[in-house]
Image (cartoon, coloured by chain):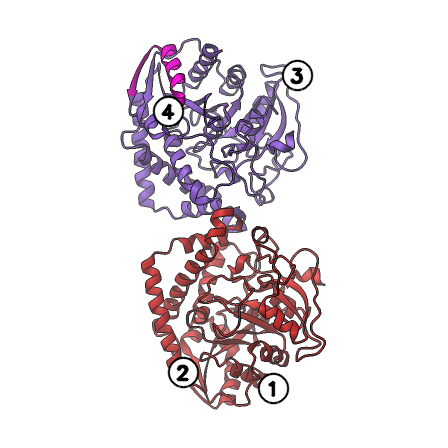
Chain colours: A purple, B red
């Protein structure tokens, strides 16, 4: 079964037992191959990455934290190359299976982590989210997934991409496991109090496929009754596509800065689409980056205004369910750009976001996202648990 | 020894005996892995190319012609990916050894063919030359090499790159073998008459490293005394760099047109530099292509004016000997651009060009090129033989 899922990186499977006792005792987890495990090369999803980098001598902070809490590591998972990708198709290692929709991509870049959890191969799995790499596979595979507040978690031992947007996230199939893992990684239990105000991002619901917005409507209604007060809001007054443009300026330019020395020294092999992404990052003019930095500042201000304590915002995580596997680039590229329009706020503003599973379109999962102000990650976990309890 | 040269593509070596009799009976040859051999996948130097294309059912014209003339095929050789490269470092198959300068690259894209001939593994080898892919490895490895008149040879069964510049060329270690093979592939014996006028391309000699121009001077003097009359000329009045710019506009745009459908459908793996080249080709504005087409027309007129019957032109084939192996891209890129300045006339104007070995700089080979008007390929062979006889 494991092989048919293709969630784990090629080669012998690693296993590291967690501490005998702890809040996660009995749970198993997998780690995206961007996280260091002592003594194991970090593959980075690219066959030329590992040999250009030393074998790590200590675990990444997130791996160590889960082990210390009692969870057992059962493998490292396939990722889009150096986390550059949102669909989960890796030309070197293949495409992990989306168990919830086997003819569709799992989403990426945390593709193998999402696939492993979705298939029940482990209870939780670590991913990274720079531009949507946890949120998108969570939506496509029907999982709980979190992009925490940027800067909140210790990212040591995690392969960086665009540091001003990089986060460590994780997946789970059920809200209780999600809450247990989140309590450990956030270092904060989910509070009892629910938010009192729900904002419905009408620009984002308008941007998603009508079938997606319709499918999510029952979840929005449950959320409204849970929270109490609700109102419609435009999340991004300049336009979701303008925020996306800013993110797609800052992120590739930073990714190029991260990988430039390696690329220029080793001329590594990449799938064409990944190399093209790096080339684009290398070509962004300074004036564009300066504009994008101003737009980021403005977007952060917007989120601070929208999300005072006690207020959360909801939107579709992705504008459509997972695309079919193996589509040609001219069909994938516009889909990727539309996904970015609904995901850009995370990398741009750093607010925490949780994907709630529970809806399908054409039989494929699609998730509802909740966003809170910076630092309110645990409140979003509370909402996730309450929503699950309400729907049970 | 074969393995240490790394001239041949991975996998079992093919061998096809040539006709029992014929002008090339007793000779062995290799074919760049861009030429079809019936029943053998054409690899194209890229690990995703072969599986996207049917196994050929007939030999390429050039392969069949050599077999029919009595030469025996002893292997297919490593090439830069889909012939996009001028240095001969292939991230998938490794870098063939330059026997004449083992710490330096062999040049490309016909890297394995040049390496095989230079190492004595075969008598001659087929290459392709779009922007310098025979001339450059001939110069770097110290071999005779020809880029024939564009459009003269039948290119069926040869993987195209930029059809308005693509040619089939070949290498040999000595002038007599070179003349025998050339007689068969050109379908024309080398004439008795030598040219009567030699033009020395002062812009090209001025552009090459001073050490290269100095090292080639004895060959230029021999050429002058062989031909009789000589005069200095500027080959490219708009500038070698302007001709190079035109070629670097037309060729990548055409290469993108050649490979776009495959790239967009399969998202194949490439070394970063190769993908970057394709991305650049995809981004060239129509107005730039239109300008380059005018410059090509002008350059063709210049070559017609410079090279009436009986006149040849000489220039350094490359501005320097082979660079060291394994240089990072920021050091290689400007070298590649300088090479293009001395090679652009071939792809741009279609005139035939032959590299004559015979000089070294720092112990590494560097060649002198002779160019004639369109269709005068056989006369260049005559000059090559006479030069060899004169230096013998």
- Residue with the mark numbered 3: A20
Q: Looking at the image, is B126 positioned above or below residue B223? A: above
A182 or B202, which lies in front?
A182
Quadrant of res B29: bottom right
Secondary structure beneath disc 2?
Answer: strand
Mark 1: few, some, or many residues within 10 Å (few <14, many ≥20)?
A: few
Q: CA distance from mark 3 to mark 4?
A: 45 Å
- Residue with the mark numbered 2: B232
Q: Is residue B4 left or right of residue A64?
A: right
Q: CA distance from mark 3 to mark 2?
A: 85 Å
Mark drawn on residue B389? 1
B13 or B249, which lies in front?
B13
Secondary structure beneath disc 1?
Answer: helix
Q: Looking at the image, is A334 positioned above or below residue B16? A: above
Residue A155 % position (x, y):
50, 29
Mark 2: few, some, or many residues within 10 Å (few <14, many ≥20)?
A: few
Chain where mark 3 sits: A
């Amino acid at each position: 079964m494991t092989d048919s899922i293709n969630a784990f990186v090629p080669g012998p499977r690693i296993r590291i037992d967690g501490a005998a006792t702890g809040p996660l005792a009995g749970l198993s987890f997998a780690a995206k191959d961007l996280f260091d495990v002592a003594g194991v090369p970090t593959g980075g999803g690219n066959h030329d990455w590992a040999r250009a980098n030393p074998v790590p001598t200590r675990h990444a902070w997130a791996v160590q934290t889960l082990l210390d809490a009692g969870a057992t590591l059962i493998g490292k998972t396939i990722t889009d190359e150096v986390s550059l990708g949102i669909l989960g198709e890796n030309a070197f290692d293949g495409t992990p299976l989306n168990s919830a929709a086997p003819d569709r991509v799992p989403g990426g870049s945390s593709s193998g982590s999402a696939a492993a959890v979705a298939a029940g191969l482990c209870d939780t799995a670590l991913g990274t989210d720079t531009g949507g790499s946890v949120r998108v596979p969570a939506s496509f595979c029907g999982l709980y997934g979190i992009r925490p507040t940027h800067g909140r978690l210790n990212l040591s031992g995690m392969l960086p991409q665009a540091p001003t947007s990089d986060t460590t996230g994780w997946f789970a199939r059920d809200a209780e496991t999600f809450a247990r893992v989140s309590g450990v990684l956030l270092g904060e239990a989910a509070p009892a109090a629910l938010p009192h105000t729900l904002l419905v991002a009408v620009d984002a619901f308008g941007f998603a496929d009508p079938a997606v917005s319709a499918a999510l409507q029952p979840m929005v209604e449950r959320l409204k009754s849970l929270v109490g007060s609700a109102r419609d809001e435009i999340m991004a007054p300049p336009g979701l596509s303008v925020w996306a443009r800013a993110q797609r300026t800052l992120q590739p330019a930073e990714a190029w800065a991260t990988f430039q020395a390696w690329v220029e020294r080793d001329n590594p092999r990449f799938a064409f689409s990944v190399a093209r992404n790096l080339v684009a990052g290398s070509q962004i003019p300074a004036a564009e980056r300066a504009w994008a930095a101003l737009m980021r500042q403005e977007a952060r201000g917007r989120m601070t205004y929208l999300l005072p304590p006690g207020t959360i915002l909801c939107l579709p995580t992705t504008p459509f369910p997972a695309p079919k596997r193996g589509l040609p680039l001219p069909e994938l590229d516009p889909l990727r750009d539309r996904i970015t329009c609904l995901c850009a706020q995370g990398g741009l503003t750093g607010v925490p976001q949780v994907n709630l599973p529970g809806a399908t379109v054409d039989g494929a999962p699609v998730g509802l996202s909740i966003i809170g102000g910076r630092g309110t990650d645990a409140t979003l976990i509370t909402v996730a648990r309450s929503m699950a309890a309400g729907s049970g």
